[in-house]
Image: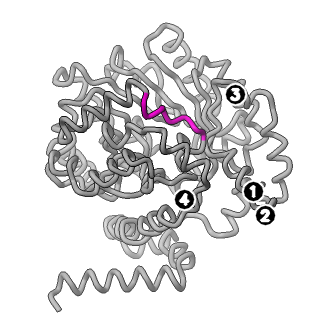
Amino acid sequence: MPETEHTAWLGALLVDFVDRLVPKRLLRLLVHPKFHALVGADRMEALGGWIDNKFMLKRRQKRCSEQQIDQSTKDYLKSRFCANPFRELETTPTGLAYVCCPIWLPTPIGTLDTPPEQLWSSDAAKRIRESILDGSFKYCSHLHCPAITGRTLPPRDAPESVAMIKQYEESPAKLPEHLVLSHDKSCNLSCPSCRSAVYMADSRKQERLDQLAERTLLPLMRGAKSVMITGSGDPFGSKHFRNLIKRLNGGDFPQLRLELISNGQLLDRRAWSELNLRGRVSYVQISIDATTASTYAIVRRGGDFKRLLKNLAFLRDLRTSGEIERLEFSMVVQTLNFREMPGFVRLGEEFAADSIIFNMIRQRDIFSREEYVEAFIGSPDHPEYDAFVETLKAPELAQPNVQIGNVLEYVKRAQAGAAV
């Protein structure tokens, strides 16, 4: 057996073994600090990427292929359209590229080292787009995608949808007009819902990321209209992303508008000035997860609540002056913070947020089973579930500027299960 075939066979065998026998035990070992120190940071990152691409990704894809879709959802999707696979490309830390959030649509279209035109027009990309056109949305997670669970997809016959479909049929190889850059995990916080420790790319990793940007990402962005930074860490906590923002503001991309997702700790007046962001940013989303200093200290580990409020006041000034076009606040709903959901809406109103977004905490490899069961308030078996359901009745959560995401979908599914 050739070496490459042997490696592929061995990898498939190990994935099957882990999947069947000891997935959580092994994964808990892999995130243990002593194991990290023994293996080394570079090898650990490579191993983590291999596990995610060869094991966890296949598990997410399997869940999509086996998801039970009720008739009302089928009927809804047949009359709807999603533009993401036709206009958006998202990068990831494991070197794969997607045409939507990898959790919402867990099928990659290729690797980031692929030539841009070839990557964008790959066979996988074509299959995904066809699934939108035929109304099946079969590659999408109907639970995790907030546009499906929240029934916010645009009609298929809407003028914008018709125009996008026509453009695709006439020019299927046209490069993406929107990029979501999530290939650097560096962040100044270590929120328990996301990671077990602070991660900062070292100088060698930063150099490789900068080379990736010059080789692949910047050519992709030359024809794009907007770029979002970041879905993986923090744009101001990452040296690579700060360098990239400076590069994009250098005059070569005058048409490109920036969209920023940040925890808000480092997004202050000084950073806005140093990165020359004036007139370049159209959208800002701040992930907060709390309305009190005590809760914030736990769910946003390493953050300072007073500093956050000061920076939110700065962002309010930017929004009310029209310097940024849209401001959103987001919360990962969990046991520690669900009672603060109504107050979170009021916090958004206080600081001029256009929308307040909620999404349920998601199972991640960093959680032990016990930790996830405790944090996942969406389970009917949770001792505080009734209090959670009662909280969802708060009038603040029914306001038109509130996006409840997939939070209500968990409740609906739980109630449907109880009815059965």
Distance between mark 2 and mark 1 Cα atoms: 6 Å
Q: Residue furthest top?
A: 321
Q: Secondary structure at mark 1?
A: helix
Q: Say what amino acid the circle numbered 4 marks.
A: Ser
Q: Is residue 98 left or right of residue 314?
A: left
Front: mark 4 or 3 = 3
Front: mark 2 or 3 = 2
Indicate which disc, 4 or 3, sits on the residue closer to the N terminus: 4
Which residue corresponds to the image point at 49% horizontal and 73% vertical from the top-left?
34
Report if residue 20 lies within the magenta region.
Answer: no
Tags 2 and 3 in contact by the CB under 8 Å rule? Answer: no
Q: Position of residue 158 (x, y in %)?
A: 43, 27
Give residue 271's quadrant in the image: top left
Along the viewing direction, whichever of 222 and 171 lies nearer the viewer: 171
Residue on which the image places disc 2: 420
Residue on which the image places disc 1: 416
Give residue 107's quadrant in the image: bottom left
Distance between mark 4 and mark 2 Cα atoms: 38 Å
Q: Give the magenta range.
A: 150-157
Residue on which the image places disc 4: 196
